[in-house]
Image (cartoon, helix red, strand yellow):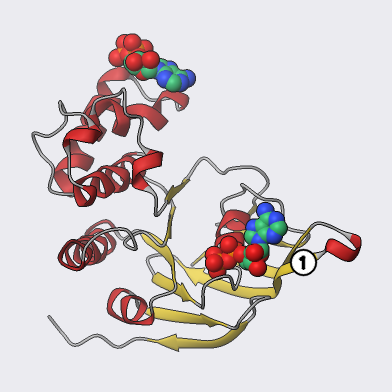
């Protein structure tokens, strides 16, 4: 079934002489369970697209639907992992509390919050780290915490914006493997935005290639991975 449907989506910043179109007439769908990536040069409009999908920026034209429901505002069952983990975690909260945090706004009991956070930390290989604070962890571990926080809310769609751009190569490989394992084991639908073509090919089932600004789709390629 179709998880994400982007239809005729355009976004223009400003107006009049200062108008700048970042995304132009994008149309594509992502099937449930797919790990798709969107790759394109810096400044082509990837973050704008992702923010439109996440309901953080209203598109100037076109629509975004998540499992058939039109997105307006931030959907409950969508989570985003950003590049900048150092700014996305609360420094005054323990790792466990950071992961539990978004669940505070959901109808989830305290006990259930705790269980889900513990499970999510286990999933990203951080069992036993819940009591630490973000600043006590390496960059790669902090990004794992961000991923755990996203997973704890069991999103229908997980969006990742340049998620591995700020970690070293070894950590990047580990986190890419982690992302693929999450997709395989949970059947998650994941959309990754990156400027790194190697990463998109290594990571995903499908690569959508964007043109230079304003972004439009120039290729939509299946990726055949060797059997494991
Ligand atoms: P990418 O994520 O691919 O690097 P962005 O979506 O961040 O691209 O930006 C696409 C284009 O839109 C760029 O030319 C950028 O300068 C412009 N842009 C991004 N955000 C804003 C904004 N808030 N106001 C005006 N222009 C913006
Ligand atoms: P518990 O639900 O486990 O009793 P608390 O309600 O005491 O936890 O809050 C735990 C931490 O979360 C506190 O450090 C508090 O500052 C922080 N916190 C709670 N709500 C918010 C919020 N809306 N914005 C920022 N921090 C918050």
Residue drawn at x 20%, y 60% as measured from the top left: 178
Position of residue 223 measured from the top left corner of the image (x, y, whole percent)? 34, 86
Position of residue 119 measured from the top left corner of the image (x, y, whole percent)? 19, 39
Q: Considering only vertical position in the picture, is 73 above or below 107? A: below
Q: Is residue 6 visible?
A: no
Identify the residue at the far left of this view: 128
Mark 1, other Cα within 10 Å: few <14 / some 14–19 / many ≥20: some
Q: Considering only vertical position in the picture, is 226 above or below 88? A: below
Q: Quadrant of the C terminus?
A: bottom left
Residue drawn at x 36%, y 77% as measured from the top left: 200
Position of residue 157 measured from the top left corner of the image (x, y, whole percent)? 45, 55
Residue identified by numbered label 1: 20
Residue drawn at x 22%, y 60% as measured from the top left: 175
Q: Considering only vertical position in the picture, is 111 above or below 17? A: above
Position of residue 37 measured from the top left corner of the image (x, y, whole percent)? 43, 72
Q: Nearer the viewer, residue 43 or 1?
A: 43
């Amino acid at each position: 079934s179709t998880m994400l449907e982007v239809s005729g989506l355009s976004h223009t910043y400003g107006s009049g002489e200062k108008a700048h179109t970042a995304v132009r007439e994008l149309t594509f769908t992502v099937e449930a369970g797919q790990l798709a990536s969107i790759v394109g040069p810096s400044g082509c409009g990837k973050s704008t697209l992702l923010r439109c999908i996440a309901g953080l920026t209203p598109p100037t034209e076109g629509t975004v639907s998540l499992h058939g429901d039109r997105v307006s505002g931030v959907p409950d069952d969508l989570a985003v992992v950003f590049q900048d983990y150092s700014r996305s975690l609360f420094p005054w909260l323990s790792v466990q509390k950071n992961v539990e945090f978004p669940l505070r706004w959901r109808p989830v009991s305290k006990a259930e919050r705790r269980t889900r956070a513990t499970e999510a930390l286990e999933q990203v290989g951080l069992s036993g780290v819940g009591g630490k604070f973000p600043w006590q962890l390496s960059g790669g571990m902090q990004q794992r915490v961000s991923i755990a926080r996203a997973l704890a809310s069991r999103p229908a769609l997980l969006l990742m914006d340049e998620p591995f751009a700020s970690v070293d190569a070894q950590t990047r490989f580990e986190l890419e493997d982690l992302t693929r394992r999450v997709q395989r084991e949970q059947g998650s639908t994941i959309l990754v935005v990156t400027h790194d073509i190697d990463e998109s090919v290594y990571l995903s089932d499908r690569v959508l290639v964007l043109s230079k600004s304003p972004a439009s789709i120039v290729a939509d390629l299946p990726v055949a991975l060797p059997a494991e």
